Every structure is written in structure tokens, then in C-alpha cells.
Image (tube, rainbow, N blue to C red):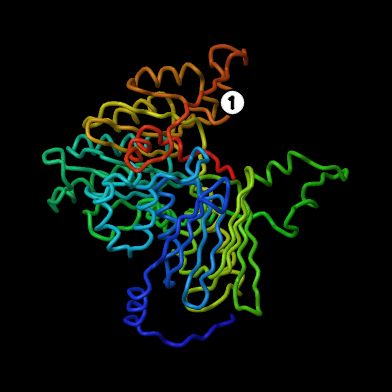
Amino acid sequence: MEIIYRPYVDPDIVSLIERMHPPRVSIDNDTCPDCTLVKVDSANKHGILLEMVQVLTDLDLVISKSYICSDGGWLMDVFHVTDQLGNKITDESLIHYIQQAISTSRESSREVQPSISKNVRPAYISAEHTALEMTGTDRPGLMSEMSAVLAEMGCHVSAAVAWTHNARAACIIYVADECNGGPITDPCRVARVQAQLENVVEAHHCNGEKRSVRLACPVGGKTHTERRLHQLMAADRDYEACCSCSVQDDDGKDEEMNSNGKFDWQRRKEREATTRVKIENCTEKGYSIVTVRSKDRPKLLFDTVCALTDMQYVVFHAAISSKGPKAVQEYYIRHKDGCTLDLEVERRRVTQCLIAATERRVSHGIRLDVTTENRIGLLADVTRVFRENGLSIARAEIGTNGDRAAGTFYVKDASGDNISRETLEMVQREIGGGTVLVLDKPLDLRSRTTSSSTGGRNSAGTEDRPKLSLGSLFWSHLERLSSNFRPIKS
């Protein structure tokens, strides 16, 4: 293992440098004809790259390219961004917020954010209510049973997000006291709720299987919800089932030829849908070079940077680009202690964790968008409808604002069969409100009562949306959470 020695720097000196040289953020709409450039110059510190990417992704902006350089204690980063419609960022209040949010430290950012907009964060993130964190074995009806317990014990769900990956499940549910609308502060009541939820999670677990249930009161400096979900699933070791395709040739041309020496389009399609990680060392510069090739999607950069940061790796240089459905990310990294990735066991772990980070947010199943009146027990009612119709939740994001609630659910048939049209219509009728079936691509929705395959396709039209503005951002999240899942277009 190669170790890079560095001089000791007093933390107080580092803090002084940050105060003397705060980040400078420039928004450039002139250089590129099709995107806005967000340029940042700043004193470097561990985790600052993740903070900047988090600001941009929380605003639902699309990052099509990025160039990172942070050697010598100083960083110079450039992000190519657009809104979800592919437009440049021209709203002055939004530009001001980006500059202010990136320029301030994490602590002061939380103090100034309410004065800009109280609802900048995604609708499924809540900082004022008690947070329930759960990890365990994925199974049909799990969220339905948990939300039913919360409703029976007088806990109102204000927001929630749930992921499933490699037969594991993790969720963060924000709950408020039904009586006062605030966090649950009574330690005895917290203990009772947690005990009931532990019984639900443990009901179908075998001896020795990992699971965890924890209720936490809101505290200052709380970790970002989606980053916390990554941490929960990594701690649950969901990455152990991940394996990377061998990457001998960067273009993969040899691997895309069939036994007859002809080009195999099916093999190329499978390769493009698979995340591939390549790790090599640059001995001259003392870096490990990590290349990640995967299918492009929203928040991909956040997920990979989050994984590297939580594994205590420092990104010194990086180049990220997306073209069509593919994304390529190249990072020059070292561990926080100065070591490169020399041991095979380290390389395997980094490879698995990066693959897991790119896969957790991938959507499986059919998407249902629900917008309805907010009420106590709403999540329990919606998830009960899914369970009673034989549907399993693969991923979910739920948010509330006053008397309105909205959520996006990705559902699959619990038995592995195709979801019938009758089932979807039944679910839409029983949930009521504004329940919309959204198909990202044509799917074969076969009826279980007929053998005909015609008439089983559905499509969803799209409406032109106004350009992104800070004042309408929260309702954009609340009413169209589905925009989070659209592919990035460069």
C-alpha cells in the first residue's frame, strides 16, 4: 500500500482560511448556448463537493457535465446545468439562492435558507418532525403494516421516502404528533412506538437476519435524507450482492461480438443497462483512478459522490459527462489518510459500493402518482390498497403541504407476474383523488381474464411546464415528483 505523507495543519488555521476565502460562485449563461455554467472557486475541505452537488440536485437541476479540480487545498469546479425542460437557469431569485447556498458554510446555510424560501428542500424531506429509520428484509406489505401502526398510535406521516435494493429495504418516515402537529418528544411514547414497529419488522425475519428500527427527534445539522438512506443501506450491506462487469476494453467492442463474430445489439443493450466500475492506480501522481460507466439518470452524480464521501475518499480531480442514455464518471481519488487503492479487497468493496449507489434509485415497476387531500392515516390507506391488490412497493416518495399530499410510488406485482389493467384501474378507483398512471415506456399490461395482448398498452402525455422559479419549486416537487425520474439529456 502506497502512503502519501502530508504536513500537519492545525484545524483552526483551516477554519481561518475558509473565513478569509469564502467560496466564489459565478453563474455563466453566455459561454454555452444550451446550458448554464455554475463555476465555484473555494478553499477545499472534505465533503464540500457533496455539499455543492446536493444544493443543485435539491433544486431538481440537471447536471449534464462537470469538471472538478481540487489539488493544493483549493478547488475550481464547473457544473453544466439546466432545468428539467432543458432550459438555462435565468430566474434571478433562483440564481441568487444558488450563489448564497453554495457560498455559505453548511451551518450558516440553514440559517439563511428560510429567508430565501422555506420550501426549497424536496417535499419528502422534513426537518421539523420525528424521523423513523428502518432497514430490513424487503417483503410485500411491509410499509403498509408500518404505516398502519403509526396511524393507530396517533402519529401523522408528514413525509417519507423508501428504497429497495438486493432484497433489502430502507425507509425514512417523518412523523408528527397527532395532538400538537410537532415532533414526538415524550421518551415513553417514542419507546412504545419503536417497540411496536420493531414487532412489525421482526415478524417475517429469520433468526440472525439484520434489521433496525430507530426513532430520532429533530436535531440541528441532521444529515440529508437521501444521503442518510445511502448510509442506512450501506450499513445493511446491501452492496454485497453487487458485482461489476469486467472492463477490459473501455468501448466494450470485443464483448459486444457474438460467437459468429457479428455485432450483438442485445449484448450492447445489456451492457448499457449495467453499471461497470474500473479502478487503476496512477503511480506518478499518487491517485487511484475510478471510472464508472452506467445508464444516465437524475441525481446520479449525487449518489456516486455520496458513496465516495461516506467511504472517506477525497476527490482531487473528476470529469463527468452524459451523452444520450449513457453516463461516464472518472474520479482521481485517495483515501482521507492519503492511501491509494492498492489492496484487492479495498477495490472490490469500492466497486460494490459504487454499483449499489447507482442502482438504489433505479426505478422498477409501474409508477403511480397520487395527489389528494392530506389526512391522518393517508399513507396507511394508500399502502393498504396496494397490499390488498397484490402489489409490492419498490420505491416511494411522499410529501405533504398543509391540506394537500402527493406521492410517487413504484409498484410491482408481489408474485412476479405482469400487473393487469384491471388491477391498476381498481387501485386508482380505491385510492381516489388524483391518481395518475405514468408509463416511462410502453408496457404490456395484460388482462388476467383474457389472452389477448392487444389494447394492453398505455401512454402518458406530458404538459409544457413553466420555467423553474424559486417561488413555485415546492409545488413543482409536490405535484410532479415524477420529474425526479426522467433521464438526463445533454
> Is 447 placed above or below 8 here?
above
Residue 390: % across, % down: 43, 26
Instruction: Name, please, the residue furthest toward the front.
Output: 30
Pick the front one: 429 or 203: 429
Q: Which quadrant of the structure image shows residue 474?
A: top left
Q: Which quadrant of the structure image shows residue 235?
A: bottom left
Residue 143: % across, % down: 35, 38
Residue at x 25%, y 39% (from the top left corner): 157
Crowd class of label 1 (few under 14; some 14 to 19; many from 20; radius 10 Å)? few
Residue at x 82%, y 44% (from the top left corner): 258
Residue 470 is left or right of residue 365, and the answer is: left
What kind of residue is marked 1?
A: Pro
Q: Secondary structure at mark 1?
A: loop
Pick the front one: 277 or 33: 33
Look at the image and tell me whether residue 208 can be seen: no
Residue 78: % across, % down: 52, 60
Instruction: Name, please, the residue furthest toward the right.
Output: 260
Quarter holding the N terminus? bottom right
> Is 336 placed above or below 274 here?
below
Residue at x 37%, y 38% (from the top left corner): 477
> Is 196 placed above or below 287 here?
above
Residue corresponding to mark 1: 442
Residue 34: % across, % down: 57, 45
Q: Which quadrant of the structure image shows residue 277?
A: bottom right
